[in-house]
Image (tube, rainbow, N blue to C red):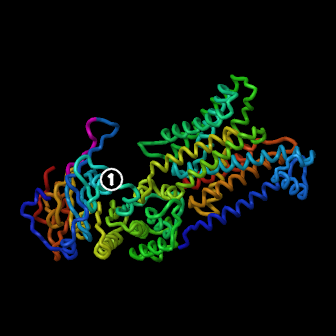
Amino acid sequence: MRPLTLKRVLWTSAALLAVLFGVVIVAMKVGAYRISFADLALNLGRLILGRRAHIPSDYQVAFGYRLPRIELSILVGAALSVAGAGFQALLRNPLADPYVLGVSSGGALGAIVALILLPHFLLATPLAAFVGAIATIAAVYFLGRRKGQLDSTTLLLAGIISASFLSAMIIFLMTNTSGSNLRGMPFWLMGDLSTPLPEAMHWVLLAGLIIGVGAIYTTAADLNLITTGEREAMHLGVEVTRVKLVVYISASLLTGLAVSMSGAIGYVGLLVPHVMRMIFGPDYRILIPASAIGGAIALLAADTLARTVMFPTELPVGAVTAMAGAPLFIYLLRRRLR
Amino acid sequence: MNDAGNGAQVIAYPGGEGGAESPVRLKIEQASYAYHPHGQSAPAFTLAATSFAARQREVVTILGPNASGKSTLLKLIAGTLKPLSGRVELEGFETSRLDTRTRAQKIAMVHQESPLLFPSRAGEYVLQGRHPYGRMLRFETKEDVEIAENALAQVGAEDLRDRWMHEISGGEKQRVILARALAQQPILLLLDEPTLHLDIGAQVELLERLRELAAESRYTVVVVTHELSLAAEFADQVVLLHEGKCLRVGTPADVYRRDLLEQVFEAPLDVDLGPEGRPRVHIRGARGHRVGGHLKET
């Protein structure tokens, strides 16, 4: 018997971080403007040393445009994956994902309402998205019950119906409002990382990510037991109600933040935790960090594909993740029904 | 403790007398409960005041048909329900007032198996029993692994350690679940219908093991069951429940009265005494194989 050790968690995280670094390099290199490795290393070094002004103007465009987008992909990917892993344990359903459950759409609706009502208050958008997300998961949770029990099929149906209803609300609001800062419908419905955000928002996202992932990680050992059954977990010393509340709030926070910055990008929260489980096993103490970094890798890779595969046109990144995620969802659903 | 014990004969059991000198460990004093679904004024189900006490090494069976209040009584003992009146004490502490972690260090519960969300190996599953002792992220220590392996050995399941939980048989799974409870190092072991999905061989094996464990490791064991014959064979004490009322508490010979059992289980039954003084229950077939029985009018 070889129980999980902190050492293994740290080594795994380090290995995944190395992969992430590799993907960052590729993402910096490819695109309309190609940069050689030497120049890339040189200018990245300048950037790290805080000498942004010394970067030659040829590269300023590439760095000024690509780097923030890479940052955003990493933060959003990590947030969505950990939210997905959290929802899967919370709802005891391996198919749970913020997008499939309608939580992303709820967040998007909240963000749009904030943009219409309080267009000049920067923090209102992520806050409202958080409120939208938490309200949606509460509604789906109660609609997904049958005879007082959480029923996995009813839950998924409740989520899919909520997502469709909320999307309709989004379309209704967007067609009836003509706000200049309201971004397009595809952005909110499919997700997109191409629109640059004010740099302050990156910091908001980073802070939220650390708080949300950190809070979920403190419950990782408890989540392992909750996946074997709430009743059993309680008899093994888990304060089930407290743990569920922490995960419920944190996963909604992560989803809300991600959606307010990048729209409703689908299936990352489903795909990444599953792949990580296949590689590293289902223990949440390793799954949470692996999902966070794996999510960053996956979304960055997907976004790099989205902006290069049909060059010079760009795909919304949500289209790429859905193309990979939807077949996996079907596969998992069928394997479960069998 | 036993209000209807007219003419009960006292029979000594091997193993049963071991608890006589030791102090009472579990004490249920006039504990009652009522379920009020949706806040209605009339309760949907009530458990009338029930009392009994158990010492270490003692195996107590809570016996009764479905919906007799067995599970409610077990939850009161486990401390997950707070009694409406009366007290449930484990070594002097009220079980419902213990915090979740302390409770899990003292009381272990074996449920009917519930489906796992993600696959797990038997060894990892048993390690979960160490959860109430860990801190924060609860990375298991060498000591935890040793305790888990001992627990597996105690139930004779060392060879299952690296097997997947979804690939082993029902009886093997039940042993692994029991091992997880033992890894909690509790003083009180509670089992909710542990024999439900087992064939008869596995049932007997499980209950024999419980007897041994109680004797060797000084557990107090409380088993909820509706299996009349198994309870008669393995219990030191039987708590007989019927429609939310505790009808009788005592040794199997004391509780197993034909009229009483027939009324509770609504079936024609015969009871006689085996060689060791333990009662044996037979079902009287409709055609009356066991002559002399008169069917109860219902």
Q: Nearer the viewer, residue A75 or A265?
A: A75
Write down the residue under mark 1.
B97
What residue type is disc 1 on?
Arg
Left or right of residue B106, residue B265 in this image? left
Q: Nearer the viewer, residue B254 or B140?
A: B140
- Give the secondary structure at mark 1: helix
Residue pushed farthest left?
B7
Question: At 71% from the left edge and 50% from the top edge, which residue is drawn?
Answer: A324
Whole-percent x, y for residue B294 in the image:
11, 58
Q: Is residue B117 above or below residue A157?
A: below
- Position of the N terminus of chain B, as image quadrant, is bottom left
Specify few, some or many for label 1: CA neighbours under 10 Å numbering under 14, 14-19, or 20 or more: some
Left or right of residue B175, residue B204 in this image? left
Q: Is residue B46 magenta?
A: yes
Residue A173 lies in quadrant: top right
Whole-percent x, y for residue A191 in the image:
71, 40
Q: Is residue A118 magenta?
A: no
Q: Can see residue A264?
A: yes
Chain under disc 1: B
Left or right of residue A120, residue B272 in this image? left
Q: Nearer the viewer, residue A333 or B254?
A: B254
Question: At 81% from the left edge and 53% from the top edge, which residue is drawn?
Answer: A48
Whole-percent x, y for residue A310 in the image:
84, 45
Question: At 74% from the left edge and 57% from the top edge, which residue is drawn?
Answer: A20
Question: At 92% from the left edge and 45% from the top edge, which residue is drawn?
Answer: A57
Whole-percent x, y for residue A321 in the image:
71, 47
Q: Nearer the viewer, residue A294 or A209?
A: A209
Q: Is residue A265 above or below residue B23?
A: above
Left or right of residue B117, residue A128 in this image? right
Which residues make up the magenta segment? B41-49
